[in-house]
Amino acid sequence: MENIYRKYYFLSQNQLKTIFEKGKQPITSDLVGWEFMGVNIGVLTKILGIRKFFKVFTTHVEGDAIIGYNLKAQQNGLDEPHLKALMTNNTDGYYHVSEDGSSKTLLINYGHHQANSRFSPVRLLRDYLVEVEPDIYLGKAYLKVFSFFVPLTYFVLRKYQKRLD
């Protein structure tokens, strides 16, 4: 089986941008109730210990938004299996998922979920998500500082397993 993370991880920012722009808007019902394995792209994410993660899109809804959260993963190699981090509190950021109005991407917004501490930097994160292959998604993460969006990194998600929450 092809290592989908390796396929995207070593691409240039321009190549990732082109792929992102050609992606299509994910169908929310394809995400709801699923857990995805994810990899942040870039050397800095490896240094910071946030390269691998899990992203869960729950069946819970607030208004028009799906509720989701991230789970920490063990930071082993790209070719090693995705494993959950061995810690008591494995959850790392809650978010709302909604259409961003462009009909091209979904917005993953960490800024409004009450489970994120009011002063947590995670509240500044905004991710935009497109589908690039069946069950494979490319995201672009930004830091929202006042009215400015500072690009952080791209990330890749692969559908992993059905969830009950």
Image: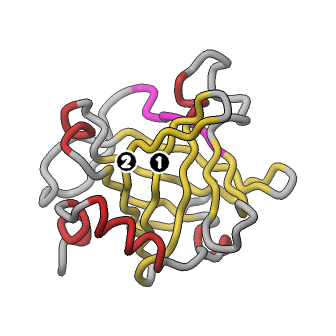
Report the disc number at residue 74: none
Can you tell which quarter of the image residue 43 is in? top left
Magenta stretch contains residue 54: no
Image x and y of residue 92, in percent: 48, 34
Tell me where the magenta segment starts and ends, as one range.
88-95
Q: Label 2 sits on what residue type?
A: Thr
Q: Position of 32 compared to 9: left or right?
A: right
- SS at circle 1: strand
- SS at circle 2: strand
Image x and y of residue 62, in percent: 82, 49
Report the disc number at residue 153: 2
Name the residue rendered at 67%, 18% in the picture. 118
Which of the pair 31/150 is nearer the observer?
A: 150
* Residue 113 position (above or below residue 84): above
Q: Position of 6 compared to 62: left or right?
A: left
The residue at which mark 1 appears reads as 141
Which of the pair 161/54 is nearer the observer?
A: 54
* Residue 9 position (above or below residue 46): below
Can you tell which quarter of the image residue 79 is in? bottom left
Image x and y of residue 153, in percent: 37, 48
Name the residue rendered at 36%, 61% in the picture. 156
* Residue 117 position (above or below residue 46): above
Q: Earlier in the sequence, mark 1 or mark 2?
A: 1
Per the picture, the main secondary structure of the magenta-coloured stretch is: strand
**CB under 8 Å between callouts 1 and 2?**
yes
Most extreme residue toward the right is 63
Q: Position of 33 compared to 89: left or right?
A: right
